[in-house]
């Protein structure tokens, strides 16, 4: 993975967890060939590991196929919540949790 290709290494992305795609605003250009073009996705793998769905792929320079970053996205169900995480040098790090119940207990206001 190449810190010279990105503006900020592992930027904080809040709750934006990408299962596919690239955060192109953080791509400053390929450190190997010097060009700033689209980023290819390669070596995509998806599977279950201990009940978690894990998706991984590589971000490559479109022109010279230099490895920019390795992307990892996970999805799991914990208790009554869907949990999402993302970790990537280019796309950043993020976490999100969404209730599978019709009304999210964390969003409920107390009556008293």
Image (spheres, helix red, strand yellow):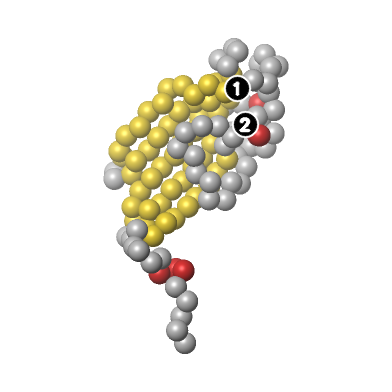
Marker disc for residue 38: 1
Residue holding disc 2: 24
- The residue drawn where x is 60% and y is 22% is 38
Q: Is residue 108 above or below residue 36?
A: below
| Label 1 SS | loop
Residue 67 visible to an observer of this rendering: no
Name the quadrant containing residue 27: top right
The percent position of residue 5, horizontal first and vertical second, equals: 66, 26
Residue drawn at x 69%, y 28% is 28
Q: Return the disc, 2 or 1, that comes first in the chain's sequence.
A: 2
Q: Position of residue 37 (x, y in %)?
A: 64, 20
Where does the image place residue 89, in percent across and percent down from the top left?
58, 34
Q: Give neighbour class at mark 1: few <14, some 14-19, many 20+ (Cα, 10 Å).
A: some
The image quarter containing residue 56 is top left
Query: Does 61 appear above or below 105?
Result: above
Q: Is residue 40 above or below residue 71?
A: above
Q: Residue at x 53, y 21 (%)?
A: 40
Viewport quadrant of the N terminus: top right
């Amino acid at each position: 993975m190449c810190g010279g290709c990105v503006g900020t290494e592992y930027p904080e992305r809040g709750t934006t967890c990408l299962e596919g795609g690239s955060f192109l605003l953080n791509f400053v250009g390929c450190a190997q060939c010097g060009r700033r073009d689209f980023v290819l996705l390669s070596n995509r793998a998806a599977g279950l590991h201990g009940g978690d769905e894990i998706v991984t792929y590589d971000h490559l320079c479109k022109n010279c196929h230099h490895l920019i970053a390795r992307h990892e996205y996970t999805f799991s169900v914990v208790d009554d919540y869907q949990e999402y995480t993302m970790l990537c040098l280019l796309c950043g790090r993020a976490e999100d949790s969404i209730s599978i119940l019709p009304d999210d207990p964390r969003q409920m206001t107390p009556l008293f």
